[in-house]
Image (cartoon, helix red, strand yellow):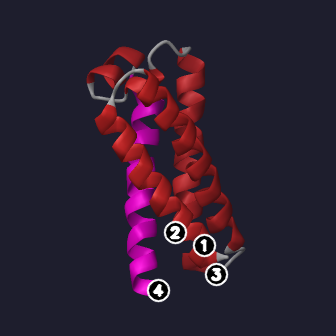
Amino acid sequence: MNTILWIIQSLAAVTFLYSGINKSIYSEQRLVAAGQTGVAGLPAGLIRFIGIIEIMGAIGLILPGLLGIFPIITAFSATGFAIIMVLAARIHYRRKEPQNVLTNVILFAMCIFIVWQRL
C-alpha cells in the first residue's frame, strides 16, 4: 500500500508542480489558451501567488515523507489541495467545462486518499 501511496503522491505533486510553475511564469492569456481556464479574469499577482502556493504544496507532498521530517505536512498539503480542487471544480462547473471538473474530482480523490493514508 505504501508504494501505491507514493505513486499517487508523486502524480499529484508533479501535476501541481507543473501547474504552479506555469502560473508563476506565464501570462493569463497563455494559461487560458493552454486549458487552465480557472485563472481567467484574475489579477496577475494573484495568479503568481497561486502558482507559488502550488509549488510549495507539491514540495509538501513529497519532501517531508522523503526526509522523515514533520511528515504531517504531507497531509496538510494534500488537505489544502483537496479544498482547492472543490473550489476549482465549482468554477469549472459554472463555466460548463466538464473535462476540467472531472480532472478536479480525480485530483480531489487522490488528495483525500493521501490525507486518509498519511493520518
- The amino acid pointed to by label 3 is Gly
Question: Overall secondary structure of the magenta stretch?
Answer: helix
Depth check, mark 4 against mark 2: the one in front is 2
Q: First in sequence, mark 3 or 4: give its number.
A: 4
How would you rate the neighbour count of disc 1 (Cα within 10 Å): few for under 14, some for 14-19, many for 20 or more?
A: few
Which residue does the numbered mark 4 point to in the structure image?
A: 2
Q: First in sequence, mark 1 or 3: give its number.
A: 3
Q: First in sequence, mark 4 or 2: give its number.
A: 4
Residue at (54, 58) in percent of width and height:
59
Image spot of residue 105 (x, y percent)? 43, 49
Q: Is residue 66 above or below residue 97?
A: below
How would you rate the neighbour count of disc 3 (Cα within 10 Å): few for under 14, some for 14-19, many for 20 or more?
A: few
Which residue does the numbered mark 1 point to in the structure image?
A: 116
Quick check: is 56 in the magenta stretch?
no
Image spot of residue 25 (x, y percent)? 42, 29
Specify start and end residues of the magenta stretch as a single range. Answer: 1-26
Cα distance in 3D space between marks 3 and 4: 14 Å
Q: Secondary structure at mark 4?
A: helix
Q: Secondary structure at mark 2?
A: helix
Depth check, mark 3 against mark 2: the one in front is 2
Quick check: is 14 in the magenta stretch?
yes
Q: Is residue 56 above or below residue 87?
A: below
Quadrant position of residue 22: top left
- The amino acid pointed to by label 2 is Phe
Which residue does the numbered mark 3 point to in the structure image?
A: 68
Residue 109 relative to residue 119: left or right: left
Q: Are marks 2 and 1 in contact (CB under 8 Å)?
A: yes
Q: Are marks 1 and 4 in contact (CB under 8 Å)?
A: no
Which residue does the numbered mark 2 point to in the structure image?
A: 113
Cα distance in 3D space between marks 1 and 3: 18 Å
